[in-house]
Image (cartoon, rainbow, N blue to C red):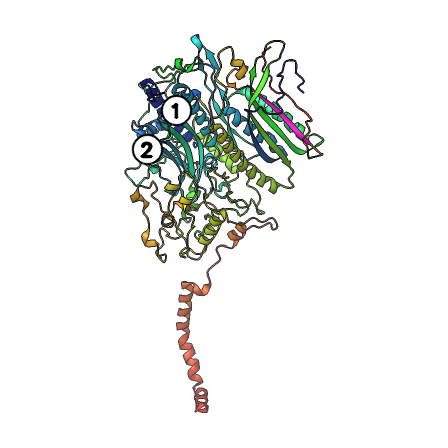
Amino acid sequence: SCPLSSRCCAASSAAPAMNCRAEVLEVSVEGRQVEEAMLAVLHTILLHRSTGKFHYKKEGTYSIGTVGTQDVDCDFIDFAYVRVSSEELDRALRKAVGEFKDALRGSGSDGMGQISLEFYQKKKSRWPFSDECIPWELWTIKVNVVNLANEQERQICREKVGEKLCEKIINIVEVMNRHEYLPKMPTQSEVDNVFDTSLKDVQPYLYKISYQITDSLGTSVTTTMRRLIKDTLAL
Amino acid sequence: AMDTDLSSQDRKDLDKFIKFFALKTVQVIVQARLGEKICTRSSSSPTGSDWFNLAIKDIPEVTHEAKKALAGQLPAVGRSMCVEISLKTSEGDSMELEIWCLEMNEKCDKEIKVSYTVYNRLSLLLKSLLAITRVTPAYRLSRKQGHEYVILYRIYFGEVQLSGLGEGFQTVRVGTVGTPVGTITLSCAYRINLAFMSTRQFERTPPIMGIIIDHFVDRPYPSSSPMHPCNYRAGEDNGAVYPSVEDSQEVCTTSFSTSPPSQCVFTVTKAHFQTPPPVVTDTLKVPVMGLAFSHQLSSSRLSYQPAALGVGSADMGYPVLFAGGLNAAHPHQLIGPGKEGGVPPVPSQPVHGTQADQERMCTPLDGVHYSAATPSSSEDTETVSNSSEGKCGSPHDLLETIFIRKVGAFVNKPVNQVTMANLDIPFAMFAPKNVELEDNDPMVNPPESPETESPLQGSLHSEGSSGSSTGNTHDDFVMIDFKPAFSKDDILPMDLGTFYREFQNPPQLSSLSIDIGAQSMAEDLDSLPEKLAVHEKNVKEFDAFVETLQ
């Protein structure tokens, strides 16, 4: 269970709630491609799940800031993607992906693991009960790390993984286009239950990233580490 | 509710949203084909000029072209806004790569809130467009443009014309947004049988400035709108300085309300655009083609030599022929020489060179960071992602067809029998029928050869009369690189491509050479008197021989 349980959501996010839609993407990559591939997918999802900063005004109206975007070229994959222009967000994702990559490389791993990006809403409960976290969208990216023997294979891998990522982007966009459940736009008092307002330039929906590594026993996924990267409960 | 009509305010708002959505769509697409990395800043305070809460720069001439094409209308049923992206080589060959279509269908969502839900969904759709424009094959092509080719755009309004994309084009849906007056659909149809530049094969020459502007305006049909290079900035002899945002153009300041829907507030204010007009540079920043390349392409014309499989003239140092095959292993992967075979991977140097030149050519627009292209690799193969809408026939059919075509330019073989109408793709009804495929197919109807053995030669297009946006018959086969199908070879260091290059231009048989023939004839004639003299000397022997025969 969560190491920060005193401040954290009561509900475990291991099993998605009934209304939570779940999407699974799978990629096979070479070790040095893990970070870029994960960042490409996570950034693409967050591009669609981030808005400008809200500024509440009188009578419950609010205005929305502007989201900038930028192109990112991958060094180890023949691929480019667009991300939100927010250094804070990029840092947060890089931190999570870096930990995932290290865990994948660690002992006890046969190169298989998954990283999850979950969007949730907070439901405030009265004292003494702690707030609930209700996930409404869960993205799971399954990763299989392959080892390549020579430069020629690496060359092919660069292209193939690039192609695969193009497919993933199209898949993600398809899901986004379904216009399924999104949390209602919150009032000022509720905004922190829906959005992460801690960043200074953009406002993603509340999210958390976690990962699991398949241990060398293979068949069952054991949770070797479960980390919360983002905890947005206000202090 | 009985009252299903849109309130007049909602209707006005909706029209405005659709108009600006169309303009922003064009900007995103064209900017994604400039060949540069795009970067805009997030701003926590709304500036009042960023439609859909996204920082998308407005390139004035692009807005100008879009408005010209729209001519005050909005996308409606049967009236779609299309952005056509094509590639043009220094030789003048051009090829349509993609058509981005913004369409409206009749399916209405009366219940949806215009000022809130529609607006936010349009914003989401623009984000999807940003993402998708980077994953179609033309993106990587456009990042490498500048010396050997440029990427052009053309905006038109009306009926979608997909015939210029060649057969077997793929489609990808970017997204849809339902509105009370119809459903907006944004999608892209893209060519898959592409031939690519191989930057390593051509000498790097410094770019030559000063190409005349109308070099890029080549549409033969007066009704078609002119093509524009994506990264062309307004030149001095053009003279026009496009206003960045016209004063009459409304700027969007959105306020959203969290009150119950009946009290939804949406305000739009007119405001003078704050950003300074874009820099109109003095020098004509037009990407240029190297001289060496021109030479290289000179014999890559799409007329095929009868015997060779489309190879250019004998003096070509490098093969520049099209083998837009599909790899058997992965039908939608485009193959590069040396990728599967033993040819060493492309060194990164030429591409960095391109980058340096592009830095010179593309100035940053005001207020926006446009970093120069920093392609991460110099690989030339493009990747094609399968459209979720379905494949065009079985990949095997396509393989077979292309393979058949390579054998003999004028053989009347059946073309790909895939009928587009059978396929579950959105633009199936617009896809060319089989006959038109053949008409467009230079393998069956080579454009310049005097031999006309193909019976279909006579029915040579032109699609032009039917309003096709393509004037070229040979747009399927702009030959730029050599990528043989089925050339995957893990065993030998030499792959099919290398073999081809080495042995493709054997010297002619001397006996077939006219010069040598003529020479021997002359020799023969000269030696006749000698031979006659010899025979005369031996006439007695001949006579004796003849007598023995009697």
Q: Position of residue B400 (x, y in %)?
A: 48, 51
Left or right, A110 with reference to B43: right
Q: Residue at x 36, y 16 (%)?
A: B268
Q: Chain of mark 2?
A: B
Asked which quadrant contains residue B189, the reply is top left
- Residue B290 in sight: yes
**Residue that numbered label 1 is attached to:** B58
Q: Which residue is mark 2?
A: B79
Percent position (x, y) of residue A119?
55, 22
Name the element at disc 1: loop
Q: Residue at x 65, y 38 (%)?
A: A147
Q: Mark 2 or 1, which is nearer the eye?
A: 2
Q: Which residues are magenta?
A: A205-214
Q: Position of residue A99 (x, y in %)?
A: 64, 25
Amino acid, disc 2: Arg
> Which of B429/B511 is in front?
B429
Q: Amino acid at mark 1?
A: Asp
Q: Is residue B522 magenta?
A: no
User: Callout 2: few (<14), some (14-19), or many (20+) C-alpha neighbours within 10 Å?
Assistant: some
